[in-house]
Image: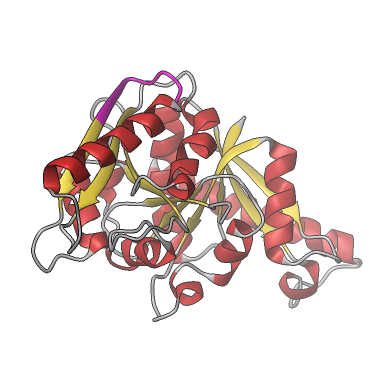
Amino acid sequence: MTILAFSDGSEHASRMLPHAYALARGTGRPLTVVRVMNRLNDLSGIVAPSTDEAAAILANRWEAELRQELRMLGIQAAIAIEPQRPDEDTPAAICRIAAEHGAQAIAFGSHGAGLIRHLVIGSTALGVLARTNLPALVVGPHVGSAAADLEGPYRLVICSDGSPAAARVADVLRPLLEGTTVAVTVLSLYEPRLGDRGPTEEKADLRARLESLAAQLPPVGSVEIAVEDLEDLESVDHGILRAAAARRANAIALATHGYSARRHLVSGSTGVGLIQHGHIPTILVRSTD
């Protein structure tokens, strides 16, 4: 079992690598950095007697570049240059490669630009999320190196609104967290709404739902249940980031679609906001919704 970090040689991918390595170290899993080769697009400009020889030349070049990059970043990882089959698009190739490697998580970099989610997260990453049940670590443009620092155990904030869809995060993360000392916080944000039963009852209900989610996790280093008030005029993603920063979190995990009647739903838009503006990596889990 391994964590696969997919690189395309870009600055965004380079920024992602220390955070993928932190996740690998924090969970005790090996890290493999993968670059996918599309012969049709990637071999142009390489002069060789055959396509196979051109592919070998490019694979050697990419591997040398990745080794140098990992050395400069102080990252210990295996390297794999994997071919994209003619009948595959890139997301399909990534899903196949992840299955062949027995991956427990995958990682991508994101440029974080744009107003719609496939421009923020990236069309390839979204295509993969639509087809895989693996958790995906997505590192946005404002994520700093501090979030990759491991002072003590890896610190993970799992966000939920208490809905069944949001609770799927525990199911998907279970294999990755088994046998680890990860410090987990299961977090929900509360904002009063007209017609609520009152903050005491609403928070008690949220806490009970979070405790149910936490019970689905394997034994880890520690588990904190936290129901926090959303501050006045504070957006959901900023509330999550505030709570995660207070815990010096290495990553924030949430379902891509976890709808509820409350404003503080854990949804695709919240995930996009975290990636676009956040200084902490986001682990996205595809909901069954």
> Which residue is depicted at the point 42% across and 53% down?
16
Q: Is residue 50 above or below residue 286?
A: below
* Residue 74 spot, x, y in % from top left: 39, 39
- Is 143 within the magenta? no
Magenta segment includes 218: yes
Q: Residue at x 25, y 25 (%)?
A: 152
Coordinates of residue 229 in the picture (x, y in percent): 13, 50
Where residue 95 sits in the image (x, y, percent)? 69, 52
Is 117 drawn above or below residue 260 in the view shown? below
Residue 44 appears anywhere in the view: yes
**Quarter placement of the C terminus:** bottom right
Quarter-wise, where is residue 272 in the image? Answer: bottom left
Which residue appears at 17% of the width and 64% of the height?
A: 194
Q: Which residues are magenta?
A: 217-224
Residue lying farthest to the bottom in this orientation = 115
What is the quadrant of the N terminus in the image? top right
80 horizontally vs 173: left or right: right
Specify whether 50 is left or right of 103: right
Of residues 156 and 79, the one drawn nearer to the viewer in this rendering = 156
Q: Report the residue that reaches farthest toward the right.
A: 50
Nearer the observer, 212 or 82? 212
Residue 155 appears in the figure: no
Dominant secondary structure, magenta? loop
Q: Is residue 152 above or below residue 226?
A: above
Task: Pick out the residue farthest to the left.
Answer: 232
Q: Residue at x 51, y 30 (%)?
A: 174
Residue 168 pos. (x, y %):
50, 42
Q: How many marks?
A: 0
- Position of 62 with respect to 203 (left or right) is right
